[in-house]
Image: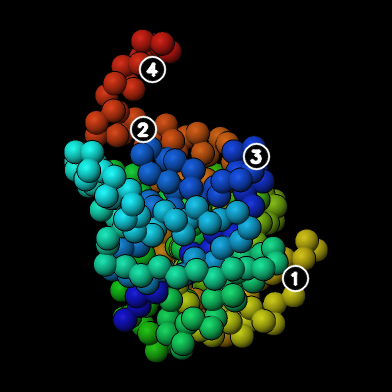
């Protein structure tokens, strides 16, 4: 059974300065919740219940957010604001939260390697803490990936979610070189981190969700850092494939949204989209936009 998700949240979020100067980008509000709460709720719905955050400098707000805040609960009760307690229900979810710190900014691959002492030979999910999947309801892609893994567990070493992106955008992502598709999944022939639009093997971009067996750690240890000193998770996966380990890819279903909170443009779009679909405030916001920006 896969019940553990590693959530890397150590990146500095420099594309979003000054917003992220002292606040983790994973704590930025998207609609009424911080980014990382959307991520955790998606994973809980896919039946994961142990979460290991790989944190870095200035990320303490994430720990506070998932902790039970008894003082706040008491305050709300004493002041007749019981209705607001429902907003804190996520604190009491049947889930456990753990934290470890990536002490050097040495890339996503290194962040995943920091989780090794916690994994104890089991398979696990990696979910990037700055990417929301789904809109009206959380994505079920991780559940599909777990099912696929469990159906083929003796042969495969990893399953990765992919999303089709416009060709000019491949430069921002890990990109699949797929073998032939088999129904709703495909086997990877290779994977390349941030190729040029001219040389890209496809337009299938890694969509921030992965499942691995602990074999990945050996390959991460063997992965040479790039020119920027960072160890890429994608490069370790590529080494695994070259070593004839089987890695599968699944596509996000058509119409499923992916919000990568990595730049102002994508952050603003995500915030607007969630705010406009807010069940309480969405319609007022829509009228405001209609009145002021007319269509
Ligand atoms: C990371 C991964 C990349 C992946 C992307 C989005 O890149 O290295 O392979 O496609 O997340 O999920 P980053 O956004 O950290 O540059």
Q: Earlier in the sequence, mark 1 or mark 3?
A: 3
Task: Give the distance between the C-alpha atoms of the residues marked 4 and 1, in whole angstroms.
Answer: 47 Å
Is residue 228 positioned above or below 113 on the image? above
Q: Residue at x 23, y 38 (%)?
A: 79
Determine the secondary structure under disc 3. Answer: loop
**Residue under pointer 2:** 275
Task: Give the distance between the C-alpha atoms of the residues marked 1 and 3, in whole angstroms.
Answer: 26 Å
Residue 257: image location, x then y, percent? 39, 46
**Residue under pointer 1:** 225
Camera-near label (3 vs 2) is 3
Q: Nearer the viewer, residue 179 or 92?
A: 92
Task: Give the distance between the C-alpha atoms of the residues marked 3 and 4, in whole angstroms.
Answer: 27 Å
Q: Quadrant of residue 230?
A: bottom right
Q: Earlier in the sequence, mark 2 or mark 4?
A: 2
Task: Give the distance between the C-alpha atoms of the residues marked 2 and 1, in whole angstroms.
Answer: 40 Å
Q: Earlier in the sequence, mark 3 or mark 2?
A: 3
Q: Quadrant of residue 253?
A: bottom left
Color encoding of the figure: rainbow
Let me know if residue 148 appears in the view: no
Q: Nearer the viewer, residue 202 or 140?
A: 140
Q: Earlier in the sequence, mark 4 or mark 1?
A: 1
Question: How busy is the neighbourhood of tag 3: few (under 14 within 10 Å), some, or many (20 plus)?
Answer: some
| Farthest residue, direction front | 78
Determine the secondary structure under disc 1. Answer: loop
């Amino acid at each position: 059974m896969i019940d553990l998700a590693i959530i890397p949240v150590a990146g500095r979020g420099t594309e979003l300065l000054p917003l992220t100067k002292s606040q983790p980008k994973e704590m930025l509000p998207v609609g009424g919740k911080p980014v990382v709460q959307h991520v955790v709720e998606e994973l809980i719905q896919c039946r994961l219940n142990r979460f290991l955050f790989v944190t870095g400098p200035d990320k303490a707000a994430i720990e506070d957010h998932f902790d039970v805040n008894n003082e706040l609960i008491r305050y709300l009760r004493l002041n007749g604001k019981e209705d607001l307690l429902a907003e804190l229900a996520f604190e009491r979810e049947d889930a456990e939260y753990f934290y470890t710190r990536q002490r050097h900014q040495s890339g996503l691959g290194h962040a995943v390697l920091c989780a090794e002492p916690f994994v104890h030979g089991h398979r696990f999910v990696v979910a990037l803490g700055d990417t929301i999947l789904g809109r009206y309801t959380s994505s079920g892609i991780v559940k599909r990936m777990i099912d696929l893994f469990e159906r083929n567990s003796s042969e495969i070493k990893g399953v990765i979610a992919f999303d089709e992106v416009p060709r000019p955008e491949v430069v921002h992502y890990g990109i699949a070189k797929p073998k032939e598709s088999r129904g709703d999944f495909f086997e990877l022939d290779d994977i390349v981190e941030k190729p040029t639009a001219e040389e890209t093997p496809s337009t299938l971009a890694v969509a921030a969700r992965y499942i691995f067996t602990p074999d990945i750690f050996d390959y991460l240890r063997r992965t040479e850092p790039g020119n920027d000193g960072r160890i890429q998770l994608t490069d370790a996966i590529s080494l695994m494939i070259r070593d004839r380990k089987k890695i599968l890819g699944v596509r996000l279903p058509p119409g499923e949204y992916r919000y990568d909170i990595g730049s102002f443009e994508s952050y603003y779009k995500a915030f607007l989209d969630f705010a406009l679909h807010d069940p309480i405030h969405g319609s007022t916001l829509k009228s405001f936009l209609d009145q002021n920006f007319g269509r």
